[in-house]
Image: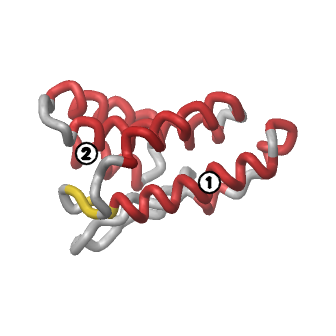
Amino acid sequence: MAEEGIRLFNAGDYFAAHEALEAAWRADAGPVRNLYRGILQVGVGYLHILRGNYTGARKMFRRCRVWLAVFPNHCRTIDVAQLRKDFEAVDSTLARLGPERIGEFDYRLFKPIARAGVAASGRGIPT
């Protein structure tokens, strides 16, 4: 479930990624479940940007920041440090644009989840 969610995220299908990662989050009783929760919230933030929902995106980034902060830089082959850096760049750009200019957001800032020791596929940019 988590691998499928990451694949979907990297393909830019943030809604489907949310569904798969939520299933992984619910199925895992250990602390790593919050890694999946953080990733799915990054994806929901990206989806909100695509839909022009400034407030929803900023809210998701505040939430995922909390979940991802506790994880080491690499966890379960996921480059968590890079994920944090990538969504922070998105969030800071969004804050700079403000709600009135969300339509100017450059979707190329959406990056795939980098994997430690695994070649990334896809760009995370929706088509």
Colouring rule applied to residues: secondary structure
Q: Residue 62 at x, y = what percent?
A: 54, 37
**Residue extending furthest right?**
100
Mark toward the viewer: 2 or 1: 1
Q: Is residue 91 above or below residue 67?
A: below
In the displayed orientation, state which residue is furthest to the front. Answer: 70
Q: Which residue is mark 2?
A: 4
Whether residues under marks 2 and 1 lie with C-beta atoms below 8 angstroms apart, the answer is no
Task: State left or right for residue 23 relative to residue 92.
Answer: left
Rendering coords of residue 109 (x, y %): 61, 60
Image mark for residue 90: 1
Residue drawn at (53%, 34%) of the image: 60
Q: Quadrant of the N terminus?
A: top left
Binning the other alpha carbons within 10 Å of mark 1 as few (below 14), some (14 to 19) or many (20 upward) gives many
Residue farthest to the top? 26
Q: Can you tell which mark lies on residue 116?
A: none
Task: Indicate the amino acid at tag 2.
Answer: Glu
Give the camera-side residue of 10 and 53.
Answer: 53
- The disc labelled 1 sits on which kind of residue? Val
Crowding at dot 2, Cα within 10 Å, few <14 / some 14-19 / many 20+, comes out as: some
Residue at (59, 31) in percent of width and height: 59
Residue lying at 22% horizontally and 74% vertically, measured from the top left: 117
Tell me which corner region of the image, top left, top right, bottom left or bottom right, holds residue 32: top left
Disc 2, SS = helix
